[in-house]
Image: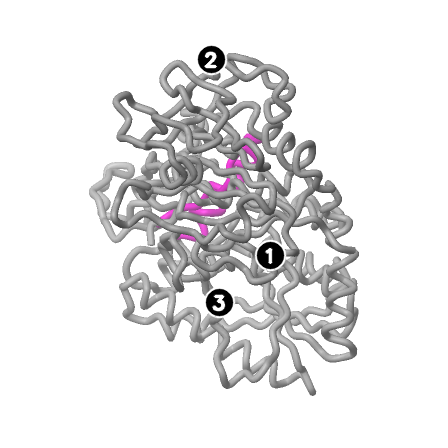
């Protein structure tokens, strides 16, 4: 089935992925491409959205897209930088803002009977995030909406299906943002809303069968949501020709290897568990640098996985749980405008010697969509609701070098924290939680004896996609109970702290 598609041109805004996700929440398929790498197959896209940007249209480094085959040819919505670009280079005027235009604002006037604002009333809250402002509309510009501080908050171009807004409809703070996108995409641009989890499953299963045929496929399972959903999708498509390998790298949560393996077998997957914890710990011996640890863990995994894959006769394909944000960020890292913090291990990381073709059934969808697809496939809600867990596992939650004893300590601490969140009904209110073992000893008193033992930091954040995150205000009574349990039950720890840093400026993990 051919779906209507929206092209989102990325100018480097931190919110670009949010635009794509909001569009998809309307059951409309969207794709993100760098502004300077417009796809050749423009005929496949029925509408275009220009994102915001940290750049200024007035600067020497202004980003110039080639809109010659888009503007006036396809319905286009320009957001923030996109709106200022249309004004600045089409006869209007953009100037530095004299008042602060960041944060919440309210629409003070809306052009009556304007389809773009159907169902949206004056006073509706929007989210501003810009240092420049449009002083004069471009040629043929028609004012559609204002706020008390921003006169030209929204406009359209007469004679074109081109709309522009200086606020961000994609963020939750814009209360009618989803409706505004629906007005533009459905009511004005006429796109069909037929991109659903069920249609994705049906089409992906068919695509896998066509691509793979009767070949054998090997997949490394991690216990996480992405690889689990990928496995069930592949199993639905090719059954026993899928060979799953679940590697214990010695850095998993307490009892996770046994528990997850049992869960996978209960799902009817053809899975083999490989305990390689000793091999990983040996590879990590004496390494303290976070990136070196990641490389050592990644290399050891490839070696173990390759050994196991060779035991499967005539395997042709490697399946990966790559999801869309991994793909976007990898593109950005190779020439797009969005900055990246870390490379992703499962994009372009396949060593040449494995000689396997790659199949990535989830590479077109976001994490929240992966969960919805998993629910459609009937996967256990407990598995789908699992917090994200880093690929290197506890290896990047133990700061400094890694030893078996440090892993034991952190596994015990982590288990008390996670089990506590579940027992107190807090687990599902948290996006990700974990404990960090710090390279710090501190003085304590236990009984009448002085101790000099480890300090651990607890971390719990709320987020929608991991790009930004706020620390969770967990109840003091809960933190008190967990702290007491950790200090009393985990030998080697005498101090517990709680991390109250948000991302940015901090990252979710400490390494």
User: Which stretch appears magenta?
Assistant: 410-436
Regarding residue 76, the answer to whether it shows in the image is: yes
- Mark 1 crowd level (few <14, some 14–19, many ≥20, 10 Å Cα): some
Q: Name the residue under label 2.
A: 108
Q: Quadrant of the N terminus?
A: bottom right
- How far apart marks 3 and 1 lie (CA) works out to 45 Å
SS of the residue at dot 1? helix
- How far apart marks 1 and 2 lie (CA) works out to 37 Å
Q: Mark 3 points at which residue?
A: 249
Discs 3/1, front: 1
Mark with earlier residue (3, 1): 1
Discs 1/2, front: 1
On screen, residue 180 above or below 11: above
Look at 32% across and 47% down and name the residue there. 62
Look at 45% across and 47% down and name the residue there. 414
On screen, residue 391 above or below 49: below
Mark with earlier residue (1, 2): 1
Disc on res. 42 = 1
On screen, residue 363 above or below 52: below
For the stretch drawn in magenta, the main secondary structure is: helix
């Amino acid at each position: 089935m051919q779906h209507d598609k929206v092209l989102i041109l990325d100018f480097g805004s931190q919110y670009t992925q949010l635009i794509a996700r909001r569009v998809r929440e309307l059951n409309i398929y969207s794709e993100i491409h760098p502004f300077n790498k417009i796809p050749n197959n423009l005929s496949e896209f029925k509408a275009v959205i220009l994102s915001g940007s940290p750049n200024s249209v007035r600067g020497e480094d202004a980003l110039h897209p080639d809109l010659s085959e888009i503007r006036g040819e396809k319905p286009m919505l320009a957001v923030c930088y996109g709106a200022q670009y249309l004004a600045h280079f089409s006869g209007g005027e953009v100037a530095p803002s004299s008042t602060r235009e960041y944060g919440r604002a309210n629409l003070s006037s809306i052009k009556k009977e304007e389809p773009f604002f159907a169902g949206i009333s004056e006073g509706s809250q929007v989210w501003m995030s810009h240092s420049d402002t449009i002083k004069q509309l471009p040629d043929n510009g028609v004012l559609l909406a204002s706020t008390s501080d921003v006169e030209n908050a929204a406009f359209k171009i007469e004679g074109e299906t081109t709309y522009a807004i200086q606020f961000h409809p994609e963020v939750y703070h814009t209360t009618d943002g989803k409706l505004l996108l629906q007005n533009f995409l459905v009511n004005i641009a006429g796109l069909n809303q037929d991109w659903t989890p069920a249609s994705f499953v049906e089409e992906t299963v068919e695509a896998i069968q066509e691509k793979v045929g009767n070949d054998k496929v090997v997949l490394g399972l991690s216990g996480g949501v992405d690889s689990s959903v990928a496995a069930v999708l592949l199993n639905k498509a090719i059954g026993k020709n899928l060979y799953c390998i679940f590697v214990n790298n010695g850095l998993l949560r307490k009892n996770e290897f046994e528990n997850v393996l049992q869960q996978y077998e209960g799902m009817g997957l053809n899975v083999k568990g490989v305990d390689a914890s000793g091999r990983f710990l040996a590879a990590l011996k004496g390494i303290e640098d976070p990136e070196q640890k990641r490389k050592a863990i990644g290399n050891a995994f490839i070696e173990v996985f390759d050994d196991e894959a060779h035991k499967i006769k005539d395997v042709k394909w490697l399946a990966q749980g790559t999801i869309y944000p991994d793909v976007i960020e990898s593109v950005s890292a190779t020439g797009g405008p969005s900055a990246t913090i870390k490379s992703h291990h499962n994009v372009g990381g396949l060593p040449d010697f494995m000689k396997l073709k790659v199949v990535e059934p989830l590479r077109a969808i976001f994490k929240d969509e992966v969960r919805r697809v998993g629910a459609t496939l009937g996967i256990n809600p407990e598995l789908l609701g699992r917090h994200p867990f880093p690929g290197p596992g506890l290896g990047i939650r133990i700061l400094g070098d890694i030893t078996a004893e440090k892993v034991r300590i952190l596994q015990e601490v982590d288990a008390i924290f996670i089990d506590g969140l579940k027992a107190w009904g807090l687990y599902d209110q948290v996006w990700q939680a974990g404990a960090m073992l710090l390279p710090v000893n501190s003085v304590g008193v236990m009984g009448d004896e002085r101790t000099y033992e480890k300090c651990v930091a607890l971390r719990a954040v709320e987020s929608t996609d991991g790009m930004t995150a706020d620390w969770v205000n967990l109840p003091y009574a809960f933190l008190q109970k967990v702290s007491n349990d950790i200090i009393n039950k985990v030998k080697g720890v005498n101090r517990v702290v709680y991390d109250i840093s948000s991302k940015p400026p901090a990252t979710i993990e400490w390494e």
